[in-house]
Image (cartoon, rainbow, N blue to C red):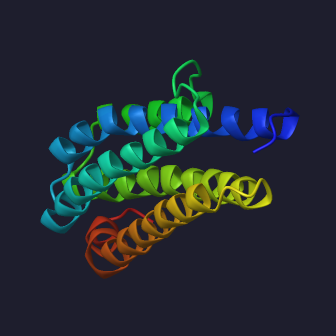
């Protein structure tokens, strides 16, 4: 692979994602603890394990590039997770908190889907087929998580949260 500004952009975006995933690994246990809905709690627990595998995939990509994954802090993810932290500190009914947690988690998922789609495309354009395949795998997982959160929200959590809502 030719080392030029395109590759630097790719590596910088990968580092950003690596930082984002590491931050998510720290945030998910707190979200698991705060969730009261068992389906939501399980979804967060499952995604914690999936995120660990996603970090391993990024490690493999960096190894293949001969680059370090460290050195960048994802400020976008930091902001999204800070918003989620603020939500968890609010005094609200458990079902309302669950709805807020889903909203915060989906913001994170959408950020990740956009970022993984970008780096997957970069990998394809740079001819790194193995990395593109690994990144697509993660992108698919993020989409599945987003769909699961939507299903949980629409089937129970949002219904329960809005049942007593003052409209």
In this image, 151 relative to 112: left or right? left
In this image, 111 relative to 41: left or right? right
Using the rendered view, name the quadrant where residue 73 is placed: top right
Using the rendered view, name the quadrant where residue 150 is placed: bottom left
Question: In the displayed image of the protein, which residue is found farthest to the bottom?
Answer: 155
Question: In the displayed image of the protein, which residue is found farthest to the front?
Answer: 1
Say which residue appears at 74% left-offset and 58% top-offset: 127
Residue 144 pos. (x, y %): 42, 72
Residue 140 pos. (x, y %): 49, 70
Front residue of 160 and 166: 160
Q: From where the camera sits, is residue 138 visible?
A: yes
Front residue of 78 and 68: 68
Say which residue appears at 28% left-offset and 69% top-offset: 157
Question: In the displayed image of the protein, which residue is found farthest to the right?
Answer: 5
Which quarter of the image is occupied by the C terminus?
A: bottom left
How many marks can you see? Answer: 0
Q: From where the camera sits, is residue 90 visible?
A: no
Front residue of 70 and 158: 70
Residue 35 pos. (x, y %): 20, 51
Residue 117 pos. (x, y %): 66, 60
Which quarter of the image is occupied by the N terminus?
A: top right
Question: Is 146 above or below relative to 68?
Answer: below
Say which residue appears at 64% left-offset and 62% top-offset: 129
Question: Is 42 above or below relative to 119?
Answer: below
Say which residue appears at 80% left-offset and 59% top-offset: 125
């Amino acid at each position: 692979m030719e080392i030029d500004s395109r590759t630097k952009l790719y590596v910088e975006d990968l580092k950003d994602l690596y930082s984002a995933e590491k931050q998510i690994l720290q945030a998910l246990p707190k979200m698991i603890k705060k969730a009261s809905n068992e389906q939501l709690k399980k979804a967060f627990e499952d995604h914690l394990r999936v995120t660990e595998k996603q970090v391993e995939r990024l490690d493999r990509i960096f190894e293949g590039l001969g680059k370090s994954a460290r050195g960048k802090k994802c400020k976008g993810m930091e902001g999204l997770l800070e918003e989620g932290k603020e939500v968890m500190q609010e005094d609200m009914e458990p079902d309302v908190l669950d709805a807020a947690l889903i909203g915060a988690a989906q913001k994170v998922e959408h950020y990740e889907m956009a970022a993984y789609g970008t780096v997957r495309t970069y990998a394809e354009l740079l001819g790194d087929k193995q990395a593109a395949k690994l990144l697509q795998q993660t992108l698919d997982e993020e989409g599945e998580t987003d769909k699961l959160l939507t299903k949980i929200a629409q089937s129970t959590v949002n219904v329960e949260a809005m049942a007593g809502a003052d409209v």
